[in-house]
Amino acid sequence: MDNAASTQINDDVLDSMLPYLKEQYGNPSSIHRYGRLARKAIEKARKQIASLINADPSEILITSGGTESNNTAIKGITKQNPGQIITSVIEHDAVLEPCKELSKNGFDIDYLPVNQFGMVNPLDLKDCISKKTSLVSIMFGNNEVGTIQPISEISKICHEHEVPFHTDAVQAIGKIPIDVKELGIDLLSISSHKLYGPKGIGALFIKNGIVIDPVILGGGQEHGLRSGTENVANIVGFGKACEIAKNNLLENMIHMKKLRDSLVKKVINKIPEVTLNGHPETRLPNNAHFTFLGVNGEDLIIKLDENGIAASTGSACSVNTQKASHVLQAMDFSHEQITGSLRLTVGIFNDQTEIEQTVNVLKKVVKELRLVSPFKEKYSFVSKN
Ligand SMILES: Cc1ncc(COP(=O)(O)O)c(C=O)c1O
């Protein structure tokens, strides 16, 4: 139930990678046949990645994952064109941290607010964008509460002002259809391990005509945009994962939505004093994010784990941070609401039995935790429970 943190590698993906970890170990920059075989495999994967988002293969820069893609987009474009960056308060740290660094170097960073559902208002962007804006970066689907942002409207405003638009689509790719042409996206970040591919590999879509400076310098691989010998096996696996995601997109979307909707319905019906957070409809099909008042989310995760269920309070990608979720704070949640939050994210390999099991365990452990809650006097639910 923590598929937003990472996903199980697909068997076909693993099979596609193995030859490149064993006999076909050539360096793709070598002229001999081993090198040429590796190069061919990379270019095939690039096509598969591009096809998932309706891009041209020449528009795909392969990176080490979502974090590097976001850093490359933000730092790469602002090296070309320094100025103001507009982003949002609910971005992943892989966007917020490079922005923070740029602000130390004199860039103006403006953070758009969100409403109670975690959604950006395009009118706020309209008020903020100007001639000095060098980049707008707004995520596609939020990693904590799953809210999908109004991407078409945002990209339209950017283009009216001739400002490039980047979106961190790490949580959305492979879960909902994304066509970069239709949506008017200029830069888009993807991560392989969120779509049943290997970890440590991803891509940045860079629309033809958008110029960015490299962040990693060296031997000039990836057309000089990202130096370093390519991770051939991971790239091949990532390409295969994209191909599988594309071929099964609708089927997977329906499967995950059905499981997620069933989970939400059962949790709300069976457990008192619970709310679903994020937008009620405009949300990623696999995401359910709840607040159980009177419960500490971290205690809940430990109890769920003891019962064989993996869950999260929010982003798994920020290590060693006990700080309250900036996303929930931005949505105006109280301290108690933030403390009682839990994210459950289903994946394509989950089934209805696991949903039933999760709900039963959740019901039991929420009840146990509420009985020892320091807030138990404050709420009426304990007697109801
Ligand atoms: C929205 C978002 N962006 C970026 C990342 C980082 O991706 P990666 O783990 O590939 O570096 C994550 C990881 O959870 C994410 O959820």
Image: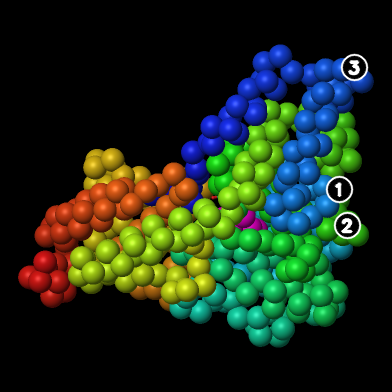
Residue farthest along the top direction in this orientation: 23
Q: Which residue is mark 3?
A: 32
| Circles 3 and 2 in contact, beta carbons < 8 Å | no
Q: For the point 82% across and 23% down, which residue is it?
A: 37
* Location of residue 312 in the rendering, given as x and y in whole percent from the top left corner: 39, 51
Label 3 vs 2, first from the N-terminus: 3
Q: Quadrant of residue 220?
A: top right
Q: Mark 2 packing: few (<14 Cα in 10 Å), some, or many (20+)?
A: few
**Label number found at residue 154:** none
* Location of residue 263 in the rendering, given as x and y in whole percent from the top left corner: 33, 60
Q: Quadrant of residue 275?
A: bottom left
Name the chief secondary structure element in magenta: loop
* Location of residue 266 in the rendering, given as x and y in whole percent from the top left corner: 27, 64
Q: Which residue is mark 1?
A: 58
Quadrant of the image for the C terminus? bottom left
- In the displayed structure, does residue 378 sit left or right of residue 214? left
Label 1 vs 3, first from the N-terminus: 3
Q: For the point 78% across and 37% down, which residue is it?
A: 44
The kind of residue tagged 2 is Asn
| Circles 1 and 2 in contact, beta carbons < 8 Å | yes
| Ligand 1 under 8 Å from disc 1 Cβ | no
Distance, label 1 to label 2, CA atoms, is: 8 Å
Q: How many marks?
A: 3
Distance, label 3 to label 2, CA atoms, is: 31 Å
The residue nearer to you, when weighing 129 against 265, is 265
Q: Quadrant of residue 218?
A: top right
- In the displayed structure, does residue 340 sit left or right of residue 104? left
Magenta segment includes 106: no
Q: Which residue is mark 2?
A: 208
* Location of residue 15 in the rendering, given as x and y in whole percent from the top left corner: 60, 27
